[in-house]
Amino acid sequence: MLFERIRRARREQGLSGRELAARFKVSRRTVRQAIESPVPPKRKPPPPRPSVLEPVKGFVDEMLREDLDAPAKQRHTIVRIIERLAAEHDFELARQTTVWEYVRKRRPEIKAEALAGRRHLEGVVPQAKRPGEEAEVDFADFWLDLAGQRRKCVLFTLRLSYSGKAVHRVYATASQEAFLEGHGEAFTVLGGVPSVHIRYDNLKPAVKQVLFGRSRLESARWASFRSWYQFSAFYCTPGEAGAHEKGGVEHEGGRFRRKHLVPPPAVDSLAELNERLAAIDVAEDARHIHGRPTSIGFDFEQERSLLRPLPADDYDCGIDLTPTVARNSRITVRQGYYSVPAKFIGTKVRVKLRANELWVFDGRQVVARHPRLTRRYTYHDILDHYLEILLVKPGAFAGASALAQARAEGGFTKVHEAFWAAAKQKAGDREGTRMLIEVLLLHRRLPAEAVVKAMETCLRIGSVSTDLVAIEARKAMEGTDAEDAELLADDGTGADAGGRSAGQEAAGARVISLHARRLPPDPRTTLPDMSKYDRLLNPVITRESGQNRKGQGA
Protein backbone atom coordinates (compact mmCIF):
# COMPACT_ATOMS: atom_id res chain seq x y z
CA MET A 1 0.00 0.00 0.00
CA LEU A 2 2.85 2.39 0.82
CA PHE A 3 4.55 1.65 -2.49
CA GLU A 4 1.32 2.37 -4.37
CA ARG A 5 0.93 5.75 -2.65
CA ILE A 6 4.55 6.65 -3.36
CA ARG A 7 4.25 5.73 -7.05
CA ARG A 8 0.98 7.62 -7.40
CA ALA A 9 2.45 10.75 -5.78
CA ARG A 10 5.47 10.49 -8.10
CA ARG A 11 3.22 9.96 -11.13
CA GLU A 12 0.63 12.64 -10.41
CA GLN A 13 2.70 15.31 -8.63
CA GLY A 14 6.20 14.69 -9.97
CA LEU A 15 7.84 14.80 -6.52
CA SER A 16 11.53 14.07 -6.16
CA GLY A 17 12.94 11.23 -4.13
CA ARG A 18 13.83 13.53 -1.22
CA GLU A 19 10.33 15.06 -1.20
CA LEU A 20 8.68 11.65 -1.31
CA ALA A 21 10.84 10.43 1.57
CA ALA A 22 9.90 13.47 3.66
CA ARG A 23 6.18 13.20 2.89
CA PHE A 24 5.83 9.51 3.66
CA LYS A 25 8.50 9.47 6.40
CA VAL A 26 10.53 6.70 4.84
CA SER A 27 14.11 6.38 3.71
CA ARG A 28 15.17 7.29 0.19
CA ARG A 29 16.09 3.67 -0.31
CA THR A 30 12.45 2.71 0.23
CA VAL A 31 11.43 5.42 -2.26
CA ARG A 32 13.86 4.01 -4.86
CA GLN A 33 12.44 0.51 -4.34
CA ALA A 34 8.88 1.79 -4.82
CA ILE A 35 9.78 3.65 -8.04
CA GLU A 36 11.70 0.70 -9.50
CA SER A 37 9.03 -1.94 -8.83
CA PRO A 38 5.40 -1.84 -7.64
CA VAL A 39 5.95 -5.08 -5.70
CA PRO A 40 7.65 -4.56 -2.31
CA PRO A 41 10.54 -6.90 -1.47
CA LYS A 42 9.48 -9.90 0.53
CA ARG A 43 9.83 -9.69 4.29
CA LYS A 44 9.98 -12.44 6.83
CA PRO A 45 6.47 -12.66 8.31
CA PRO A 46 6.30 -12.35 12.09
CA PRO A 47 4.96 -15.33 14.00
CA PRO A 48 1.19 -15.16 14.58
CA ARG A 49 0.05 -13.94 17.97
CA PRO A 50 -3.31 -15.37 19.03
CA SER A 51 -5.51 -13.00 20.98
CA VAL A 52 -6.20 -13.78 24.62
CA LEU A 53 -9.83 -12.83 23.92
CA GLU A 54 -10.29 -15.63 21.38
CA PRO A 55 -12.45 -17.87 23.68
CA VAL A 56 -14.88 -15.07 24.58
CA LYS A 57 -15.07 -12.97 21.41
CA GLY A 58 -18.51 -14.36 20.65
CA PHE A 59 -19.85 -13.27 24.04
CA VAL A 60 -18.39 -9.77 23.63
CA ASP A 61 -19.96 -9.49 20.16
CA GLU A 62 -23.33 -10.48 21.62
CA MET A 63 -23.07 -7.69 24.23
CA LEU A 64 -22.28 -5.17 21.49
CA ARG A 65 -25.30 -6.34 19.46
CA GLU A 66 -27.52 -5.85 22.51
CA ASP A 67 -26.27 -2.25 22.68
CA LEU A 68 -27.72 -1.52 19.22
CA ASP A 69 -31.23 -1.41 20.67
CA ALA A 70 -30.31 -0.27 24.20
CA PRO A 71 -30.72 3.33 25.41
CA ALA A 72 -27.66 5.48 24.75
CA LYS A 73 -26.83 5.86 28.48
CA GLN A 74 -27.29 2.16 29.26
CA ARG A 75 -24.80 0.54 26.91
CA HIS A 76 -21.88 -1.63 27.89
CA THR A 77 -18.72 0.13 28.92
CA ILE A 78 -15.31 -1.59 28.87
CA VAL A 79 -15.40 -2.05 32.63
CA ARG A 80 -18.89 -3.54 32.52
CA ILE A 81 -17.88 -5.99 29.77
CA ILE A 82 -14.90 -7.15 31.86
CA GLU A 83 -17.15 -7.59 34.90
CA ARG A 84 -19.69 -9.68 32.96
CA LEU A 85 -16.96 -11.86 31.47
CA ALA A 86 -15.62 -12.58 34.96
CA ALA A 87 -19.03 -13.19 36.54
CA GLU A 88 -20.81 -15.11 33.79
CA HIS A 89 -17.94 -16.88 32.01
CA ASP A 90 -15.20 -17.01 34.67
CA PHE A 91 -12.80 -15.20 32.34
CA GLU A 92 -10.23 -12.86 33.90
CA LEU A 93 -7.24 -13.19 31.61
CA ALA A 94 -7.68 -10.06 29.47
CA ARG A 95 -6.41 -6.62 30.42
CA GLN A 96 -8.61 -3.56 30.09
CA THR A 97 -6.60 -2.20 27.13
CA THR A 98 -6.99 -5.50 25.25
CA VAL A 99 -10.78 -5.43 25.64
CA TRP A 100 -10.85 -1.74 24.73
CA GLU A 101 -8.93 -2.30 21.47
CA TYR A 102 -11.22 -5.14 20.45
CA VAL A 103 -14.43 -3.24 21.25
CA ARG A 104 -13.16 -0.13 19.43
CA LYS A 105 -12.71 -2.23 16.28
CA ARG A 106 -15.79 -4.43 16.52
CA ARG A 107 -18.47 -1.90 17.60
CA PRO A 108 -18.59 -0.03 14.22
CA GLU A 109 -18.38 -3.32 12.30
CA ILE A 110 -21.38 -4.78 14.14
CA LYS A 111 -23.29 -1.57 13.58
CA ALA A 112 -22.45 -1.66 9.85
CA GLU A 113 -23.58 -5.30 9.64
CA ALA A 114 -26.92 -4.40 11.20
CA LEU A 115 -27.49 -1.48 8.83
CA ALA A 116 -26.46 -3.41 5.71
CA GLY A 117 -29.73 -5.34 5.51
CA ARG A 118 -32.02 -2.28 5.71
CA ARG A 119 -33.85 -1.09 2.61
CA HIS A 120 -32.32 1.87 0.77
CA LEU A 121 -35.03 4.49 0.24
CA GLU A 122 -33.06 7.50 -1.00
CA GLY A 123 -33.24 8.66 -4.60
CA VAL A 124 -30.42 8.57 -7.14
CA VAL A 125 -28.90 11.33 -9.27
CA PRO A 126 -28.03 10.67 -12.96
CA GLN A 127 -24.35 11.16 -13.73
CA ALA A 128 -22.52 12.46 -16.82
CA LYS A 129 -19.35 10.50 -17.62
CA ARG A 130 -16.29 11.88 -19.35
CA PRO A 131 -14.42 9.90 -22.05
CA GLY A 132 -11.62 7.60 -20.93
CA GLU A 133 -11.92 8.30 -17.21
CA GLU A 134 -14.09 5.61 -15.62
CA ALA A 135 -15.11 1.98 -15.94
CA GLU A 136 -17.13 -0.53 -13.91
CA VAL A 137 -16.48 -4.19 -13.11
CA ASP A 138 -18.71 -6.98 -11.86
CA PHE A 139 -19.21 -10.76 -11.83
CA ALA A 140 -22.48 -12.46 -12.88
CA ASP A 141 -23.41 -16.13 -12.42
CA PHE A 142 -24.73 -18.29 -15.26
CA TRP A 143 -25.04 -21.94 -16.27
CA LEU A 144 -23.60 -23.77 -19.26
CA ASP A 145 -23.11 -27.32 -20.56
CA LEU A 146 -19.37 -27.93 -20.34
CA ALA A 147 -18.23 -31.17 -22.01
CA GLY A 148 -21.75 -32.58 -21.59
CA GLN A 149 -22.16 -31.60 -17.92
CA ARG A 150 -24.31 -28.75 -16.57
CA ARG A 151 -22.04 -26.37 -14.59
CA LYS A 152 -22.26 -22.99 -12.93
CA CYS A 153 -19.61 -20.45 -13.96
CA VAL A 154 -19.12 -16.69 -13.69
CA LEU A 155 -19.17 -13.96 -16.32
CA PHE A 156 -16.58 -11.22 -15.81
CA THR A 157 -17.61 -7.85 -17.28
CA LEU A 158 -15.60 -4.64 -17.56
CA ARG A 159 -17.62 -1.76 -19.03
CA LEU A 160 -16.39 1.72 -19.94
CA SER A 161 -18.77 4.26 -18.41
CA TYR A 162 -18.73 6.77 -21.28
CA SER A 163 -19.05 4.67 -24.45
CA GLY A 164 -20.57 1.52 -22.94
CA LYS A 165 -17.86 -0.63 -24.59
CA ALA A 166 -17.76 -3.88 -22.61
CA VAL A 167 -15.43 -6.88 -22.47
CA HIS A 168 -16.82 -10.22 -21.28
CA ARG A 169 -14.92 -13.34 -20.24
CA VAL A 170 -16.01 -16.61 -18.63
CA TYR A 171 -14.21 -18.22 -15.69
CA ALA A 172 -14.77 -21.31 -13.59
CA THR A 173 -14.96 -19.37 -10.31
CA ALA A 174 -14.88 -15.78 -9.10
CA SER A 175 -11.36 -16.30 -7.73
CA GLN A 176 -8.70 -13.63 -7.42
CA GLU A 177 -6.86 -15.19 -10.38
CA ALA A 178 -10.00 -14.82 -12.53
CA PHE A 179 -10.50 -11.27 -11.25
CA LEU A 180 -6.97 -10.21 -12.20
CA GLU A 181 -6.91 -12.14 -15.47
CA GLY A 182 -10.23 -10.61 -16.53
CA HIS A 183 -8.79 -7.12 -16.00
CA GLY A 184 -5.70 -8.01 -18.00
CA GLU A 185 -7.76 -9.38 -20.91
CA ALA A 186 -10.03 -6.31 -20.88
CA PHE A 187 -7.13 -3.83 -20.82
CA THR A 188 -5.53 -5.63 -23.76
CA VAL A 189 -8.75 -5.52 -25.79
CA LEU A 190 -9.36 -1.84 -24.98
CA GLY A 191 -5.74 -0.88 -25.57
CA GLY A 192 -5.46 1.10 -22.34
CA VAL A 193 -6.59 1.72 -18.76
CA PRO A 194 -9.18 4.24 -17.47
CA SER A 195 -7.33 7.36 -16.36
CA VAL A 196 -9.32 8.14 -13.16
CA HIS A 197 -10.74 5.01 -11.51
CA ILE A 198 -12.74 1.80 -11.88
CA ARG A 199 -15.84 1.16 -9.75
CA TYR A 200 -16.26 -2.05 -7.74
CA ASP A 201 -18.46 -3.51 -5.10
CA ASN A 202 -16.69 -4.99 -2.07
CA LEU A 203 -15.82 -8.33 -3.64
CA LYS A 204 -13.39 -10.65 -1.86
CA PRO A 205 -10.66 -10.79 -4.55
CA ALA A 206 -10.01 -7.07 -3.94
CA VAL A 207 -11.22 -6.16 -0.43
CA LYS A 208 -10.09 -7.88 2.75
CA GLN A 209 -12.00 -5.60 5.13
CA VAL A 210 -14.54 -2.78 4.80
CA LEU A 211 -13.57 0.19 6.97
CA PHE A 212 -15.25 3.57 7.49
CA GLY A 213 -16.74 5.42 4.53
CA ARG A 214 -14.94 4.57 1.28
CA SER A 215 -11.85 3.23 3.02
CA ARG A 216 -11.03 -0.42 2.38
CA LEU A 217 -8.29 -2.80 3.45
CA GLU A 218 -7.21 -4.27 0.11
CA SER A 219 -5.48 -7.58 -0.54
CA ALA A 220 -1.77 -7.34 -1.28
CA ARG A 221 -1.92 -8.86 -4.78
CA TRP A 222 -4.77 -6.57 -5.79
CA ALA A 223 -2.87 -3.50 -4.60
CA SER A 224 0.17 -4.72 -6.54
CA PHE A 225 -1.95 -5.27 -9.67
CA ARG A 226 -3.43 -1.75 -9.49
CA SER A 227 0.00 -0.27 -9.03
CA TRP A 228 1.29 -2.24 -12.02
CA TYR A 229 -1.40 -0.79 -14.34
CA GLN A 230 -1.52 2.56 -12.50
CA PHE A 231 -5.23 3.01 -11.87
CA SER A 232 -7.34 3.74 -8.81
CA ALA A 233 -10.30 1.83 -7.37
CA PHE A 234 -13.64 3.31 -6.26
CA TYR A 235 -15.56 1.04 -3.88
CA CYS A 236 -19.33 1.29 -3.68
CA THR A 237 -21.37 1.33 -0.49
CA PRO A 238 -21.82 -2.24 0.82
CA GLY A 239 -25.09 -4.04 0.12
CA GLU A 240 -28.05 -2.96 -1.97
CA ALA A 241 -27.52 0.65 -0.95
CA GLY A 242 -24.49 0.87 -3.24
CA ALA A 243 -25.75 -1.15 -6.21
CA HIS A 244 -26.86 1.98 -8.10
CA GLU A 245 -23.32 3.39 -7.90
CA LYS A 246 -22.26 1.04 -10.70
CA GLY A 247 -25.62 0.48 -12.35
CA GLY A 248 -24.15 0.39 -15.85
CA VAL A 249 -22.27 -2.88 -15.39
CA GLU A 250 -25.09 -4.35 -13.26
CA HIS A 251 -27.46 -3.87 -16.18
CA GLU A 252 -24.87 -4.98 -18.75
CA GLY A 253 -24.25 -8.31 -17.02
CA GLY A 254 -27.95 -9.18 -16.98
CA ARG A 255 -28.55 -7.97 -20.55
CA PHE A 256 -25.62 -9.92 -21.97
CA ARG A 257 -26.64 -13.07 -20.10
CA ARG A 258 -30.23 -12.92 -21.33
CA LYS A 259 -29.30 -12.21 -24.94
CA HIS A 260 -26.23 -14.37 -25.56
CA LEU A 261 -26.30 -17.09 -22.89
CA VAL A 262 -29.89 -18.26 -23.30
CA PRO A 263 -30.28 -21.20 -23.78
CA PRO A 264 -27.23 -22.31 -21.77
CA PRO A 265 -24.38 -22.67 -24.28
CA ALA A 266 -22.88 -26.12 -24.91
CA VAL A 267 -19.09 -26.08 -25.34
CA ASP A 268 -16.17 -28.46 -24.88
CA SER A 269 -14.01 -25.96 -22.98
CA LEU A 270 -14.17 -22.49 -21.47
CA ALA A 271 -11.54 -21.34 -23.96
CA GLU A 272 -13.96 -22.14 -26.78
CA LEU A 273 -16.71 -20.09 -25.12
CA ASN A 274 -14.35 -17.16 -24.53
CA GLU A 275 -13.54 -17.13 -28.25
CA ARG A 276 -17.27 -16.83 -28.96
CA LEU A 277 -17.65 -14.00 -26.46
CA ALA A 278 -14.72 -12.14 -27.99
CA ALA A 279 -16.44 -12.27 -31.38
CA ILE A 280 -19.73 -11.13 -29.83
CA ASP A 281 -17.99 -8.16 -28.17
CA VAL A 282 -16.64 -7.05 -31.55
CA ALA A 283 -20.07 -7.40 -33.18
CA GLU A 284 -21.72 -5.37 -30.42
CA ASP A 285 -19.71 -2.28 -31.37
CA ALA A 286 -22.52 -1.60 -33.83
CA ARG A 287 -25.17 -1.66 -31.07
CA HIS A 288 -26.87 1.58 -29.93
CA ILE A 289 -27.50 2.16 -26.23
CA HIS A 290 -31.02 3.38 -25.55
CA GLY A 291 -31.31 7.13 -26.05
CA ARG A 292 -27.97 7.57 -27.85
CA PRO A 293 -27.77 8.54 -31.53
CA THR A 294 -24.29 7.03 -32.02
CA SER A 295 -23.12 3.44 -31.71
CA ILE A 296 -20.89 1.98 -29.01
CA GLY A 297 -18.02 1.58 -31.44
CA PHE A 298 -18.26 5.22 -32.59
CA ASP A 299 -18.17 6.53 -29.00
CA PHE A 300 -15.33 4.19 -28.10
CA GLU A 301 -13.15 5.58 -30.87
CA GLN A 302 -13.44 8.98 -29.19
CA GLU A 303 -12.17 7.75 -25.82
CA ARG A 304 -9.64 5.15 -27.02
CA SER A 305 -6.84 7.74 -27.25
CA LEU A 306 -7.72 9.13 -23.79
CA LEU A 307 -7.04 5.86 -21.96
CA ARG A 308 -3.82 5.50 -19.99
CA PRO A 309 -1.21 3.48 -21.96
CA LEU A 310 -0.53 -0.11 -20.98
CA PRO A 311 2.76 -1.10 -19.29
CA ALA A 312 5.42 -2.81 -21.37
CA ASP A 313 4.88 -6.22 -19.74
CA ASP A 314 1.75 -8.05 -18.65
CA TYR A 315 1.10 -8.83 -14.99
CA ASP A 316 1.46 -12.50 -14.01
CA CYS A 317 -2.01 -13.28 -12.68
CA GLY A 318 -1.29 -16.90 -11.71
CA ILE A 319 -0.07 -18.23 -8.35
CA ASP A 320 3.10 -20.32 -8.05
CA LEU A 321 2.83 -23.31 -5.70
CA THR A 322 5.14 -26.26 -4.93
CA PRO A 323 3.06 -29.26 -3.79
CA THR A 324 4.49 -32.73 -3.20
CA VAL A 325 3.42 -35.60 -5.46
CA ALA A 326 1.75 -38.35 -3.41
CA ARG A 327 2.04 -42.11 -3.98
CA ASN A 328 -1.12 -42.06 -6.09
CA SER A 329 0.66 -39.67 -8.50
CA ARG A 330 -1.56 -36.75 -7.47
CA ILE A 331 -0.94 -33.29 -6.09
CA THR A 332 -3.34 -31.36 -3.86
CA VAL A 333 -4.08 -27.75 -4.82
CA ARG A 334 -6.87 -25.77 -3.13
CA GLN A 335 -8.44 -29.02 -1.85
CA GLY A 336 -8.59 -30.46 -5.37
CA TYR A 337 -6.56 -33.41 -6.67
CA TYR A 338 -4.67 -33.38 -9.98
CA SER A 339 -2.58 -36.18 -11.51
CA VAL A 340 1.02 -35.75 -12.66
CA PRO A 341 3.36 -38.17 -14.48
CA ALA A 342 4.26 -41.09 -12.25
CA LYS A 343 8.01 -40.42 -12.46
CA PHE A 344 7.53 -37.41 -10.14
CA ILE A 345 6.12 -39.45 -7.22
CA GLY A 346 7.71 -38.33 -3.96
CA THR A 347 9.12 -35.08 -5.36
CA LYS A 348 7.99 -31.46 -5.31
CA VAL A 349 6.77 -29.89 -8.55
CA ARG A 350 6.15 -26.29 -9.49
CA VAL A 351 2.51 -25.46 -10.21
CA LYS A 352 1.02 -22.38 -11.85
CA LEU A 353 -2.61 -21.94 -10.74
CA ARG A 354 -4.48 -19.78 -13.25
CA ALA A 355 -8.11 -18.71 -13.56
CA ASN A 356 -9.28 -21.67 -15.65
CA GLU A 357 -6.23 -23.94 -15.77
CA LEU A 358 -3.52 -25.53 -13.68
CA TRP A 359 -0.06 -26.07 -15.20
CA VAL A 360 2.56 -28.44 -13.76
CA PHE A 361 6.20 -27.71 -14.60
CA ASP A 362 9.39 -29.75 -14.62
CA GLY A 363 11.91 -26.93 -14.78
CA ARG A 364 10.59 -24.77 -17.62
CA GLN A 365 8.72 -27.57 -19.38
CA VAL A 366 4.98 -28.05 -18.88
CA VAL A 367 4.41 -31.72 -18.04
CA ALA A 368 0.69 -31.58 -17.22
CA ARG A 369 -2.25 -29.27 -17.87
CA HIS A 370 -5.59 -29.60 -16.10
CA PRO A 371 -8.81 -27.60 -16.02
CA ARG A 372 -9.16 -25.85 -12.69
CA LEU A 373 -11.44 -27.73 -10.29
CA THR A 374 -14.15 -25.71 -8.55
CA ARG A 375 -15.42 -28.18 -5.95
CA ARG A 376 -13.51 -29.46 -2.93
CA TYR A 377 -12.22 -33.03 -2.88
CA THR A 378 -12.83 -33.58 -6.59
CA TYR A 379 -10.10 -34.90 -8.87
CA HIS A 380 -8.92 -34.78 -12.46
CA ASP A 381 -6.73 -37.67 -13.64
CA ILE A 382 -5.01 -38.17 -17.00
CA LEU A 383 -4.58 -41.80 -18.05
CA ASP A 384 -1.19 -41.19 -19.66
CA HIS A 385 0.29 -40.27 -16.27
CA TYR A 386 -0.25 -43.81 -14.93
CA LEU A 387 0.89 -45.95 -17.89
CA GLU A 388 4.33 -46.82 -16.42
CA ILE A 389 2.66 -48.06 -13.23
CA LEU A 390 0.00 -49.96 -15.16
CA LEU A 391 2.65 -51.77 -17.22
CA VAL A 392 3.78 -53.39 -13.96
CA LYS A 393 0.25 -53.69 -12.54
CA PRO A 394 -2.04 -54.31 -15.54
CA GLY A 395 -4.74 -55.72 -13.27
CA ALA A 396 -5.40 -52.21 -11.93
CA PHE A 397 -6.18 -50.84 -15.39
CA ALA A 398 -9.86 -51.82 -15.60
CA GLY A 399 -10.81 -50.07 -12.36
CA ALA A 400 -8.54 -47.03 -12.68
CA SER A 401 -10.24 -43.66 -12.09
CA ALA A 402 -8.10 -42.22 -14.88
CA LEU A 403 -9.64 -44.73 -17.31
CA ALA A 404 -13.17 -43.78 -16.24
CA GLN A 405 -12.33 -40.10 -16.76
CA ALA A 406 -10.75 -40.81 -20.16
CA ARG A 407 -13.93 -42.59 -21.23
CA ALA A 408 -16.10 -39.71 -20.02
CA GLU A 409 -13.98 -37.12 -21.84
CA GLY A 410 -13.81 -39.16 -25.06
CA GLY A 411 -10.07 -39.84 -25.00
CA PHE A 412 -10.58 -43.60 -24.61
CA THR A 413 -12.62 -44.36 -27.72
CA LYS A 414 -14.62 -47.34 -28.92
CA VAL A 415 -11.64 -48.32 -31.05
CA HIS A 416 -9.51 -48.59 -27.90
CA GLU A 417 -12.22 -50.73 -26.31
CA ALA A 418 -12.38 -53.04 -29.33
CA PHE A 419 -8.58 -53.39 -29.49
CA TRP A 420 -8.47 -54.15 -25.75
CA ALA A 421 -11.15 -56.84 -26.07
CA ALA A 422 -9.37 -58.43 -29.07
CA ALA A 423 -6.00 -58.38 -27.26
CA LYS A 424 -7.46 -60.03 -24.13
CA GLN A 425 -9.16 -62.67 -26.24
CA LYS A 426 -5.91 -63.51 -28.01
CA ALA A 427 -3.32 -63.18 -25.21
CA GLY A 428 -5.32 -63.31 -21.99
CA ASP A 429 -6.44 -60.55 -19.64
CA ARG A 430 -3.01 -59.65 -18.22
CA GLU A 431 -0.97 -59.72 -21.42
CA GLY A 432 -3.81 -58.29 -23.49
CA THR A 433 -4.10 -55.32 -21.16
CA ARG A 434 -0.33 -54.82 -21.29
CA MET A 435 -0.51 -54.79 -25.11
CA LEU A 436 -3.17 -52.06 -24.96
CA ILE A 437 -0.98 -50.01 -22.58
CA GLU A 438 1.92 -50.27 -25.02
CA VAL A 439 -0.37 -48.91 -27.71
CA LEU A 440 -1.45 -46.07 -25.42
CA LEU A 441 2.22 -45.17 -24.97
CA LEU A 442 2.36 -44.50 -28.72
CA HIS A 443 0.15 -41.44 -28.13
CA ARG A 444 3.14 -39.67 -26.57
CA ARG A 445 5.06 -39.57 -29.86
CA LEU A 446 2.39 -40.03 -32.52
CA PRO A 447 -0.86 -38.12 -33.19
CA ALA A 448 -3.94 -39.65 -31.58
CA GLU A 449 -5.79 -39.76 -34.92
CA ALA A 450 -2.98 -41.77 -36.49
CA VAL A 451 -2.90 -44.29 -33.62
CA VAL A 452 -6.68 -44.78 -33.71
CA LYS A 453 -6.60 -45.24 -37.47
CA ALA A 454 -3.80 -47.79 -37.08
CA MET A 455 -5.79 -49.76 -34.49
CA GLU A 456 -8.78 -49.83 -36.84
CA THR A 457 -6.56 -51.20 -39.60
CA CYS A 458 -5.11 -53.91 -37.35
CA LEU A 459 -8.58 -54.91 -36.15
CA ARG A 460 -9.73 -55.35 -39.74
CA ILE A 461 -6.95 -57.84 -40.46
CA GLY A 462 -7.36 -59.60 -37.11
CA SER A 463 -4.03 -58.53 -35.62
CA VAL A 464 -3.26 -57.03 -32.19
CA SER A 465 0.48 -56.58 -32.73
CA THR A 466 1.72 -53.38 -31.12
CA ASP A 467 4.56 -53.19 -33.63
CA LEU A 468 2.11 -53.31 -36.51
CA VAL A 469 0.05 -50.55 -34.86
CA ALA A 470 3.19 -48.40 -34.70
CA ILE A 471 3.93 -49.07 -38.39
CA GLU A 472 0.44 -48.18 -39.55
CA ALA A 473 0.34 -45.11 -37.29
CA ARG A 474 3.56 -43.77 -38.85
CA LYS A 475 2.16 -44.40 -42.30
CA ALA A 476 -1.02 -42.51 -41.42
CA MET A 477 1.00 -39.67 -39.86
CA GLU A 478 3.28 -39.33 -42.89
CA GLY A 479 0.39 -39.61 -45.33
CA THR A 480 1.99 -42.50 -47.29
CA ASP A 481 0.18 -45.46 -48.80
CA ALA A 482 1.31 -49.07 -48.65
CA GLU A 483 1.31 -51.30 -51.65
CA ASP A 484 -1.87 -53.07 -52.62
CA ALA A 485 -3.13 -54.63 -49.38
CA GLU A 486 -3.20 -58.37 -48.90
CA LEU A 487 -5.60 -59.84 -46.40
CA LEU A 488 -4.36 -62.39 -43.89
CA ALA A 489 -5.95 -65.52 -45.23
CA ASP A 490 -5.86 -69.24 -44.78
CA ASP A 491 -7.07 -71.80 -47.32
CA GLY A 492 -10.68 -71.21 -48.25
CA THR A 493 -10.85 -67.51 -47.31
CA GLY A 494 -11.84 -66.43 -50.79
CA ALA A 495 -8.73 -64.23 -51.38
CA ASP A 496 -7.66 -63.57 -54.94
CA ALA A 497 -4.22 -64.23 -56.37
CA GLY A 498 -2.90 -60.95 -55.03
CA GLY A 499 -4.11 -61.78 -51.53
CA ARG A 500 -7.16 -59.42 -51.58
CA SER A 501 -10.63 -60.61 -50.67
CA ALA A 502 -13.78 -59.23 -52.27
CA GLY A 503 -14.79 -57.56 -49.00
CA GLN A 504 -11.42 -55.88 -48.64
CA GLU A 505 -11.47 -54.80 -52.28
CA ALA A 506 -14.82 -53.12 -51.66
CA ALA A 507 -13.60 -51.45 -48.45
CA GLY A 508 -10.49 -50.11 -50.17
CA ALA A 509 -8.19 -51.41 -47.39
CA ARG A 510 -4.48 -51.20 -48.08
CA VAL A 511 -2.74 -53.47 -45.53
CA ILE A 512 0.53 -55.40 -45.86
CA SER A 513 -0.04 -59.16 -45.45
CA LEU A 514 2.86 -60.50 -43.40
CA HIS A 515 1.74 -64.09 -44.02
CA ALA A 516 1.69 -63.71 -47.81
CA ARG A 517 5.12 -62.07 -47.86
CA ARG A 518 6.67 -65.07 -46.08
CA LEU A 519 5.49 -67.47 -48.83
CA PRO A 520 7.79 -68.46 -51.77
CA PRO A 521 7.39 -66.04 -54.65
CA ASP A 522 4.95 -66.79 -57.42
CA PRO A 523 6.41 -65.96 -60.87
CA ARG A 524 2.96 -64.81 -61.98
CA THR A 525 2.88 -62.03 -59.37
CA THR A 526 4.94 -58.90 -58.81
CA LEU A 527 6.82 -58.60 -55.54
CA PRO A 528 6.00 -55.52 -53.39
CA ASP A 529 8.44 -52.62 -53.16
CA MET A 530 9.89 -52.44 -49.63
CA SER A 531 11.55 -49.02 -49.95
CA LYS A 532 8.71 -47.22 -48.17
CA TYR A 533 9.19 -49.45 -45.14
CA ASP A 534 12.98 -49.12 -44.92
CA ARG A 535 12.79 -45.63 -43.43
CA LEU A 536 10.66 -46.82 -40.52
CA LEU A 537 13.81 -48.34 -38.94
CA ASN A 538 11.79 -50.75 -36.85
CA PRO A 539 13.46 -53.98 -35.64
CA VAL A 540 10.35 -55.97 -36.53
CA ILE A 541 10.48 -54.80 -40.13
CA THR A 542 14.21 -55.62 -40.29
CA ARG A 543 13.54 -59.20 -39.21
CA GLU A 544 10.62 -59.56 -41.62
CA SER A 545 12.65 -58.17 -44.53
CA GLY A 546 15.37 -60.74 -43.79
CA GLN A 547 12.82 -63.54 -43.85
CA ASN A 548 11.42 -62.28 -47.16
CA ARG A 549 14.87 -62.27 -48.73
CA LYS A 550 15.44 -65.87 -47.57
CA GLY A 551 12.11 -66.86 -49.10
CA GLN A 552 12.97 -65.19 -52.38
CA GLY A 553 16.34 -67.01 -52.49
CA ALA A 554 14.60 -70.35 -52.01
Image (cartoon, rainbow, N blue to C red):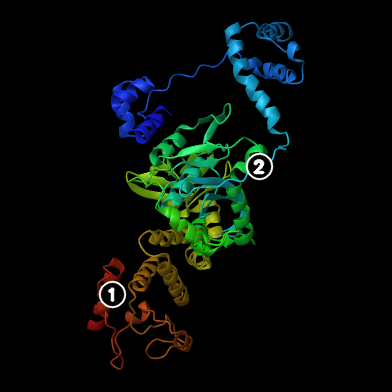
In the rendering, which numbered label is found on residue 185?
Answer: none
Is 422 situated above or below 273?
below
Q: Is residue 225 left or right of residue 144?
A: left
Is residue 421 or residue 164 the one in the foreground? Answer: 164
Dot 1: element: helix
What number is the disc on residue 124?
2
Identify whether 180 is placed above or below 117. Answer: below
Q: Amino acid at mark 2?
A: Val
Write the residue at 50% across / 40% down: 176
Disc 1 packing (10 Å; few <14; some 14–19; many ≥20):
some
Residue 255 visible:
yes
Residue position for label 1: 533
**Does residue 320 show up?**
no
Label 2 crowding class (10 Å Cα cut-off): few <14, some 14-19, many 20+?
few
- Earlier-in-chain disc, 1 versus 2: 2
In this image, 335 relative to 315: left or right? right
Q: Position of residue 244 (x, y in %)?
A: 63, 43
Q: Nearer the viewer, residue 249 or 507?
A: 249
Label 1 close to label 2 by CB (< 8 Å): no
**Amino acid type indicated by mark 1:** Tyr
Q: Is residue 540 above or below residue 136?
A: below
Q: CA distance from mark 1 to mark 2?
A: 80 Å
Q: Quadrant of residue 225?
A: top left
Who is closer to the viewer here, 187 or 497? Answer: 187
Q: Residue at x 37, y 69 (%)?
A: 473
The percent coordinates of residue 436 (x first, y second) are 45, 61
Quadrant in which the C terminus appears: bottom left
